[in-house]
Image (spheres, helix red, strand yellow):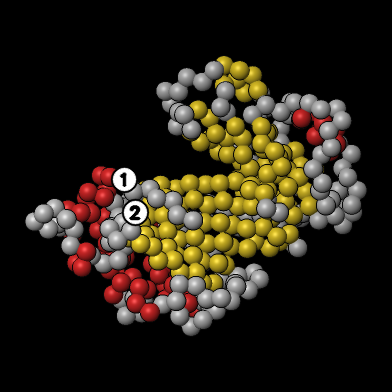
Amino acid sequence: MRLRTWTAAGFGMVLMLVGCGDDGTIPDGTLRFGQVGEVSLALEVPLLFRGGAGELRQVLTWNSGGAWLLRESISYRGLEGDENLTRKQGDPGTYASLIAQLNEAPALKLFEDLEPEVLDPCAPGTTKVTLAVWDEVRKDERIFVRCSEGSLATLKTSEAGPDPEAVRVIQAAILVRDFTEGTGFISAYSGSVPFGTLDRSEDSGALLDTARAFYSEREGSLDTPDDWVPFWRAHTGKPAAHPPVIDWANEMVLVAAVGKRIEAGDSIEIHQVLQTGEGTQVNLFERVPGDFCSPAATEHYPVHIVVAPRTLLPPVRFSHPKTERVPCGL
């Protein structure tokens, strides 16, 4: 999965760096593979918590103009819970340094004799790492798939597999991280229990003033919380609505809410679900229209409803929402 973010301006900058022939063409033989193009790194990280299976997906794309983007998303039961984007302009020279290492460093040399993908799938609980390099001049792409332990922040060559050559791919992935996010990178979802969205609405009929948590009173009990069905029906505005199926013995439902808002586009989101020694901490983000936007005035009750593996309960504490201003039109 490649997200090409490079621009014509960035492409032109790289051409100036590598030079052109007298007729304006690029001398292909002088270019390293991927020197003009893009590197994409994707990690599928299993998140297992008390029998609940989720995933952290991290996709970093970096183009030869220097700009890079990291997209992280957390999910549970195949339902996406939240997504976070990081964009930086970056430096074409740093990108070129990475490409030089991928082509020429003795321990790497990805484009010489390395098999793109081994047939053995990643073992349960391990991370699938996909590294793709697109060469814009040659109109060619090389994709390498291997396995390791941990996430983008904690990848280790010692855990690379399933073949001995996997070390080269994982080392290349670590270099991509170090050259962009840096060695001190921390994921936006570090420490979070996996969670998935059941519904997200800018105007809930439940008219909640504060956040709520739904869970069975006795751990291990399948008993449905008394107020769950009435809440769901009020939220949807359908008196006979059937709420999503929840395994109350092993799962819980968390509802982010901040009460009435008066500008269209205002939303609330659960960003992290952290189990602590004293219970559960749920961190919230409130997204509001950015400066110089002119949203319509309208009363509404935004909510974000998620399902997650049951953590230590009670108590459940919801943070005061962090405010993030969203650019107009997004």
Q: Which mark is residue 63?
A: 2
Q: For residue 261, which quarter of the picture?
A: top right
Q: Position of residue 104 (x, y in %)?
A: 28, 75
Task: State whether residue 51 is above or below residue 301.
Answer: below
Residue ranking furthest to the left? 22
Q: Position of residue 294 (x, y in %)?
A: 47, 19
Tell me, yes or no, if residue 215 can be seen here. Answer: no
**In this picture, residue 130 sits left or right of residue 12:** right
Task: State whether residue 125 is above or below residue 303.
Answer: below
Q: Position of residue 102 (x, y in %)?
A: 33, 70
Q: Nearer the viewer, residue 237 or 181?
A: 237
Of mark 2 and mark 1, the one earlier in the sequence is 1
Number of numbered discs: 2
Residue ranking furthest to the top? 297
User: Which residue corresponds to mark 1?
Assistant: 7
Residue drawn 50% across the image and 72% down it: 117
Pointer 1 local density, CA inside 10 Å: few below 14, some 14–19, many at least 20: some
Residue drawn 23% across the image and 54% down it: 14
Q: Secondary structure at mark 1?
A: loop
Q: Nearer the viewer, residue 189 or 91?
A: 91
Q: For residue 241, which quarter of the picture?
A: top right
